[in-house]
Amino acid sequence: MDITSFIIYCFIVTFTPGPTNIVILSTVHNYGAKKAMEYTYGATIAFGLLLSISAQC
């Protein structure tokens, strides 16, 4: 892989929202910020667990 392809990939991954971000924005729009914060906390904890489990394997 050359450096140009790598930089393009990094740019796309950095600025493209994932499904979690889209669901959080939708929740804020439909139910308000308080409900969205509950979802955000859950998504953050789940991602942390995923990272810790992956690090142990």
Image (cartoon, rainbow, N blue to C red):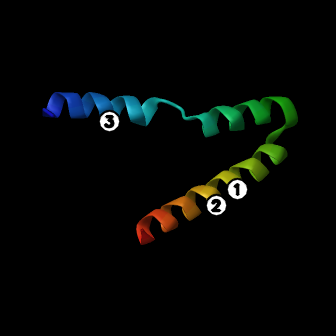
Front-most of residues 18 and 56: 56
Q: Would you name the residue on which mark 2 appears?
A: 45
Residue lying furthest left: 2
Q: Residue 18, how many percent across, how many down?
A: 55, 35
Q: Determine which of the numbered discs, if any, sits on residue 20 in the image.
A: none
Looking at the rendering, which quadrant does residue 2 occupy?
top left
Badge 1 marks a residue whose secondary structure is: helix
Counting residues from the N terminus, which is met first, the one under dot 1 or under dot 3?
Answer: 3
Rendered residue at 48%/29% (across/down): 16
Looking at the rendering, which quadrant does residue 15 occupy?
top left
Q: Determine which of the numbered discs, if any, sits on residue 10 in the image.
A: 3
Q: Residue 29, how many percent across, how many down?
A: 79, 29
Q: Residues within 10 Å of mark 1 (few under 14, many from 20)?
A: few
Looking at the rendering, which quadrant does residue 45 occupy?
bottom right
Rendered residue at 71%/55% (across/down): 42
47 to 23, vertically: above or below: below
Q: Are marks 1 and 2 in contact (CB under 8 Å)?
A: yes
